[in-house]
Image (spheres, helix red, strand yellow):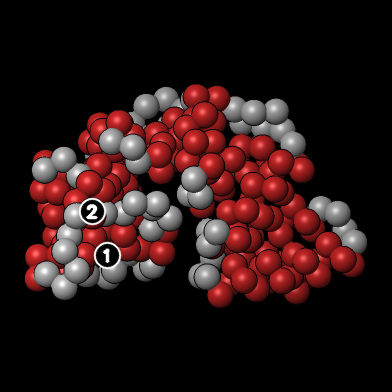
């Protein structure tokens, strides 16, 4: 979660002032946009995303690094606009220069998955670690995925489990399913029980992967 979602504008507001209350409301909206749960169902009304994208552009033009972070995520995922890797990169780099460490996740994803450039998993890892260190669930998930597959790092089931468990605990829906998948490899009653608990949590969070694995366990 953002440690300072308000950016430079969050300080110095007088308690009870109309301007301060309005600004606080805008900053709460910004926080929701950059936190993982903003993905929700990504709002069926695309018009909302279009409006938010324009809002973050305007905030970014005024020097708000958190708005640059939000805009980077919108450009990376195609929320309210076409997927725009160059914009995502520039906005993320601007956010990082402004002190938003979380924005390293955008660059990590671009390097790891090859978004707008050739995939370079090894280059993604330092960015992912920086973002994971400040609690970004997607960065933890990426690290778990990398350690599971040995992409950009030496394969390590222990490290994969550690990062996927951290991502799941931080609210990443699919991380529970990935962690459960690794636990099932142990083929013990205890690990199976832990996997089932994780899959149920993943299903509650809406992970299609969790539903698939739970169904597979029933059939086998």
For label 2, the crowd category at 10 Å Cα-Cα, with few meaning under 14, some 14 to 19 and many 20 or more, is few
Q: Quadrant of residue 197?
A: bottom right
- In the picture, the quarter occupied by the N terminus is bottom left
Residue 92 has which mark? none
80 or 28, nearer to the observer: 28
Residue 150 sits above or below residue 59 on the image: above
In the rendered image, which residue does mark 2 sit on?
11
Q: Position of residue 26 (x, y in %)?
A: 19, 63
Q: Position of residue 74 (x, y in %)?
A: 27, 49
Q: Is residue 25 left or right of residue 202?
A: left
Give the residue at x 58% y 54%: 167
Could one spot residue 138 in this view of the protein?
A: no
Q: Position of residue 206 (x, y in %)?
A: 51, 70
Q: Is residue 174 left or right of residue 52?
A: right
Residue 28 has which mark? 1
Q: Secondary structure at mark 2?
A: loop
- In the picture, the quarter occupied by the C terminus is bottom right
Give the residue at x 31% y 54%: 5
121 or 138, nearer to the observer: 138
**Mark 1 to mark 2 CA distance (whole Å):** 14 Å
For label 1, the crowd category at 10 Å Cα-Cα, with few meaning under 14, some 14 to 19 and many 20 or more, is few
Q: Position of residue 41 (x, y in %)?
A: 37, 68
């Amino acid at each position: 979660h953002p440690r300072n979602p308000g950016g430079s504008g969050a300080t110095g507001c007088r308690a009870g002032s109309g301007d301060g209350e309005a600004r606080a409301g805008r900053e709460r909206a910004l926080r929701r946009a950059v936190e993982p749960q903003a993905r929700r169902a990504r709002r069926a009304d695309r018009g909302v995303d279009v409006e938010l994208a324009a809002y973050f552009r305007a905030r970014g033009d005024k020097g708000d690094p958190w708005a640059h972070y939000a805009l980077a995520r919108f450009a990376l995922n195609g929320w309210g606009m076409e997927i725009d890797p160059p914009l995502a990169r520039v906005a993320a780099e601007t956010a990082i220069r402004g002190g938003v460490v979380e924005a390293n996740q955008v660059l990590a994803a671009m390097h790891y998955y090859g978004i707008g450039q050739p995939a370079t998993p090894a280059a993604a890892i330092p960015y992912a670690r920086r973002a994971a260190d400040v609690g970004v669930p997607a960065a933890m998930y990426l690290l778990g995925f990398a350690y599971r597959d040995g992409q950009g790092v030496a394969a390590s089931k222990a490290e994969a489990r550690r990062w996927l468990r951290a991502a799941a605990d931080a609210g990443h829906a699919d991380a529970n399913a990935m962690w459960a998948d690794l636990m099932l490899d142990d083929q013990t009653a205890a690990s199976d029980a832990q996997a089932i608990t994780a899959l149920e949590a993943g299903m509650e969070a809406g992970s299609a992967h969790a539903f698939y694995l739970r169904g597979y366990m029933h059939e086998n």
